[in-house]
């Protein structure tokens, strides 16, 4: 999937998307039951992405700071 920063995205989020997103991202938690401190992945308000270009590079982005790019 390809994503882009929202208008209210932080500089850090913008840089991560720019640096690692040329070939897209994979939602590393999609379809999995992940809990962080007892909170389900779907309810965290954050998404764990892995870069297709750099598969060992994973990071969390706040859901309000990214959107799917068309």
Image (tube, rainbow, N blue to C red):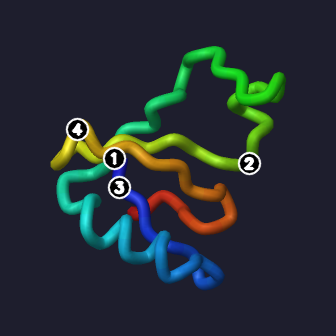
- Residue that carries the numbered disc 1 in the rendered image: 25
Q: Secondary structure at mark 2?
A: loop
Residue 48: percent from left, percent from top: 51, 41
Asked whether, in this view, residue 15 is left or right of residue 7, the answer is left
User: Marks 2 and 1, how far apart in space?
Assistant: 18 Å
In the rendered structure, are the residues bearing label 3 and label 2 in contact, judged by CB atoms less than 8 Å apart? no
* Vertical side of 41 occupied by 33: above or below: above
Instruction: Specify which label sits upstream in the sequence, 1 or 3.
Output: 3
In the foreground, 54 or 23: 54
Asked whether, in this view, residue 1 is left or right of residue 66, the answer is left
- Label 3 neighbour load within 10 Å: few <14, some 14-19, many 20+: some
In the foreground, 11 or 64: 11
Q: How many numbered badges does the structure rendering display?
A: 4
User: Marks 3 and 2, how far apart in space?
Assistant: 19 Å
- Residue that carries the numbered disc 4 in the rendered image: 55
Q: Which mark is residue 2?
A: 3
Quarter occupied by the C terminus: bottom left
Instruction: Specify which label sits upstream in the sequence, 4 or 3.
Output: 3
Instruction: Specify which label sits upstream in the sequence, 2 or 1.
Output: 1
Q: Nearer the viewer, mark 1 or mark 3?
A: 1
Instruction: Specify which label sits upstream in the sequence, 1 or 4.
Output: 1
| Residue drawn at x 37%, y 66% as measured from the top left | 16
- Label 4 neighbour load within 10 Å: few <14, some 14-19, many 20+: few
Asked whether, in this view, residue 39 is left or right of residue 20, the answer is right
Q: Nearer the viewer, mark 3 or mark 2?
A: 2
In the foreground, 18 or 2: 18
Residue 2: percent from left, percent from top: 35, 55
Instruction: Specify which label sits upstream in the sequence, 3 or 2.
Output: 3
Q: Which mark is residue 67?
A: none
Q: Which mark is residue 45?
A: 2
In the rendered structure, are the residues bearing label 1 and label 3 in contact, judged by CB atoms less than 8 Å apart? yes
Q: Nearer the viewer, mark 4 or mark 3?
A: 4
């Amino acid at each position: 999937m390809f994503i882009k920063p929202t208008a209210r995205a932080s500089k850090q989020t913008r840089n991560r998307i720019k640096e690692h997103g040329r070939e897209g991202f994979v939602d590393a938690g999609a379809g999995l039951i992940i809990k962080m401190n007892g909170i389900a992945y779907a309810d965290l308000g954050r998404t764990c992405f892995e870069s297709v270009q750099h598969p060992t590079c994973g990071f969390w982005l706040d859901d309000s700071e990214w959107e799917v790019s068309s």
